[in-house]
Each structure stands twice: as C-alpha cells, then as structure tokens.
Image (spheres, grey):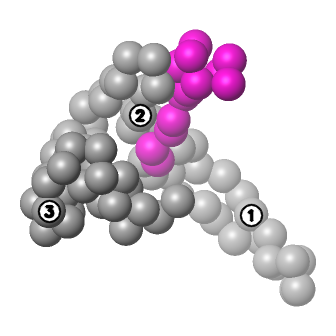
Amino acid sequence: MIKADLVNRVAESSDVPRVKAALAVETIFAAMKTALSEGKRIEFRGFGVFQVRDRKRGVGRNPKTGVEVAISPGKTVRFKPGKELKNL
C-alpha cells in the first residue's frame, strides 16, 4: 500500500473529495514527522507505537573488499505492533 492508496481509502470511506483526503493524509504525516523529529513517541491504540531510539555505534565491513568501516551512533525509528495487530 502506498500513500495514494491511503488517500483513496480516506476519500471513499468519508465521502470527501480526493483533494481534501490528500490534505488530511499529508497533515497526519507532517504531524508524525514533526513529533518523531522532536523525539516524541506516537501511540495508536490497537495498532502500535512509533518510537525514536538510539542506535549504537559499531563496526561494519565492505562485503567486496572486507575493509572495516566505523558506523557512527545515531537515531532510528522503531515500530512495535499493538496486541490487535499482532493477533491478525
């Protein structure tokens, strides 16, 4: 499923024009991006939780040459499915 599929589903289920449905989907994604960039947790009951987690530094290898490469620490977004989603 891609963003256009979400827009179509919102438009069909709520009887609004596709333009307004696209604006609604874009607004939700923008709010999620803002919250995650601020390090906040996003929780949808019954669906799951998006969380920003620290990624530790490590050592990787170039598969062609075998040369070790340092991987710097950073942040990543993790998704943990909710109970209802797991049971599907």
Residue 13: horizontal and vertical position, in percent? 29, 44
* Pick the front one: 86 or 79: 86
- Callout 1 amino acid: Gly
- As drawn, the label of residue 50 is 2
- In the figure, residue 61 lies in which quadrant? bottom right
Label 3 element class: loop
Q: Is residue 69 magenta?
A: no
Q: Is residue 46 above or below residue 19?
A: above
- Callout 2 amino acid: Phe
- As drawn, the label of residue 11 is none
Q: How many marks?
A: 3
How many angstroms separate mark 1 from mark 3 (CA)? 49 Å
Residue 66: horizontal and vertical position, in percent? 88, 77
Label pair 1/2, CB-CB below 8 angstroms? no
Residue that carries the numbered disc 1 in the rendered image: 60
Query: Quick one: quadrant of the C terminus?
Result: top right
Q: Which residues are magenta?
A: 76-88
Residue ID at (45%, 44%): 77
Q: Tell which tag, 1 or 2, sits nearer the viewer.
A: 2
Q: Is residue 16 visible to us here? A: yes
Label pair 3/2, CB-CB below 8 angstroms? no
Label 2 element class: strand
- As drawn, the label of residue 17 is 3
Q: Is residue 80 left or right of residue 40?
A: right
Residue ID at (25%, 55%): 11
